[in-house]
Image (tube, grey):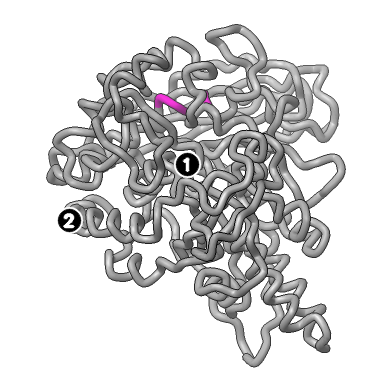
Amino acid sequence: MKVRLLLALLVTVVCPLLHAQTANPPSAKPRTVVTTDGEVDDVDTFVRLLLYANEFDIVGLVYSSSQWHYKGDGKGTTMTSEMPSTAERYGKRTDLRWPGTTWMQAYIDKYAQVYPNLSKHAPGYPTPEKLQRLVKVGNIDFEGEMSTDTEGSDFIKKILLDNDPSPVYLQIWGGTNTVARALKSIENTYKNTADWPTIAKKVSDKAVIYAVLDQDATYQKYIAPNWPTIKVLYNSDQFWSFAYLWPRVVPAELKPYLGGAWFAEQIKFGHGPLLDAYYLWGDGRQLPGDPEHTHGDMAEAKKYDRSQYDFISEGDSPAFFYLIDVGLRSMDDISYGGWGGRMVRSASNPYRWEDGKGVTDYNPFTKKQDAAYPQTRWIPVLQNDFAARADWCVKSYKKANHPPVVKLSHSALLSAKPGQAVFLSGSATDPDGDALTYNWWQYDEVGTYKGKVKLVNADKQKASFTVPADAASGETIHLILEVTDARTPQLTRYQRVIVTTNN
């Protein structure tokens, strides 16, 4: 989560350092650690993440547990979940649906087979060897277990204490317990020393948690009360666009992008070993260690009215969608909205941003405000982008598609008075020489001015509008320049202009 506070941090703040005279320069790409419990949707999220691994700096891949998956201690110790729904469903258990601690390594091996071709299409893909070195085992014995240091928690601790002042985006695909243990270990080490105020501020300024639901109680019980100024992005609603309940959430007009015909053609077949191992409904495959992963059985698929090769879930993908710079500037402020969803600052905690039922975008298909639509609205462009990356695994540069590069001809921040004309101008180039279409549109829900503006020449490189007479001083209007190429699958990139009114 980069909001204005974090942007200021990146640009102007050098965190105090221990045992060093100067800081390392900030990372050019957002640094991120993935923690995962190995659910089938985590596996599919991981596959897609590897295709985008050039867009951010992966610094850790850590196995963790959750209310749905834990290994047990091998001694017959039992536990009952602290999460009411899981406690009712499973009761007392010694272990639960544990998929093991080798699946990420196996998928990185598949990535290794397509890595040479991916690298032809974009610079910056990490080597398979580097990714393998980043895989660590965290706190996995039980749901919420954070009583002992582990290889994974120690690794996260080391990253949070290093001399790079850049934010570290902690993606929580399962429980927060391994991150909680890393923080607890830092507290245990420094709490009673003179360095503690400096250390606590340094870690709190660096750590940014992107959590998809609470999948154990460690955030509420330990992180929130003991590390209250750590930034948190909490996705409780919008992720369902890319999760198991998508058939209930996604409008009928967009469902083909998640259907079996699309996935069979664009992703599953003919795109190399990494995507061949992507899980889909009715694919005949079984996730090791998880008897409840029955999606591969066609008889099971029919029970849920699913067709063969329909999408199952990537409920955690919004956590890394957020880190992909496509020009929407949502990392400046997640309330701006972007591929990773849209959240607003909590009324009770200024360090926490949330979605929920009160954060809605207008759904043009249902003609209603929709709590999932801040994420759902991007499904066509996200899926087309996924298909293009799948092609990168097997096709030459010439035969694949690559996104346009979009620029503004003026500042991204403008000011104007009511009644004043605002002239917008942008341009784009396409690496493949494809024809481009332009579309300027107002992101109504994001601007503080709640009326609509009338855009002139919205389909041109240069557009304009007049600031409405009823716009109050200090209100903002967000305009998005969307540029799409003409090749299949079509790829889209953006620029955002924010106009602030002054009277």
User: Where is mark 2, residue-wise?
Assistant: 113
Of residues 205 and 443, which is closer to you in this image?
205
Give coordinates of residue 497: x percent, y percent.
Answer: 60, 36
> Main SS of the magenta segment?
helix
Asked if residue 427 shows in the view, the reply is no
Of residues 21 and 306, which is closer to you in this image?
306
Quarter of the C terminus within the rendering: top right
Give coordinates of residue 29: x percent, y percent.
Answer: 47, 61
* Three-letter residue code for mark 1: Ser
- Residue at 48% from the left image edge and 65% from the top image edge: 28
- Residue 364 magenta-drawn? no
- Residue at 58% from the left image edge and 57% from the top image edge: 142
What is the quadrant of residue 470 in the picture?
A: top right
Give coordinates of residue 419: x percent, y percent.
Answer: 75, 20
The residue stretch that appears in magenta: 376-380
The answer to whether 353 appears left or right of 340 in the picture is right
- Residue at 53% from the left image edge and 9% from the top image edge: 365
- Residue at 52% from the left image edge and 16% from the top image edge: 248
Secondary structure under tag 2 reads helix
Gap in Å between the C-alphas at discs 1 and 2?
23 Å
The answer to whether 21 appears left or right of 51 in the picture is right
Residue 317: mark: 1
Asked if residue 67 shows in the view, the reply is yes
* Three-letter residue code for mark 2: Gln
Give coordinates of residue 88: x percent, y percent.
Answer: 66, 35
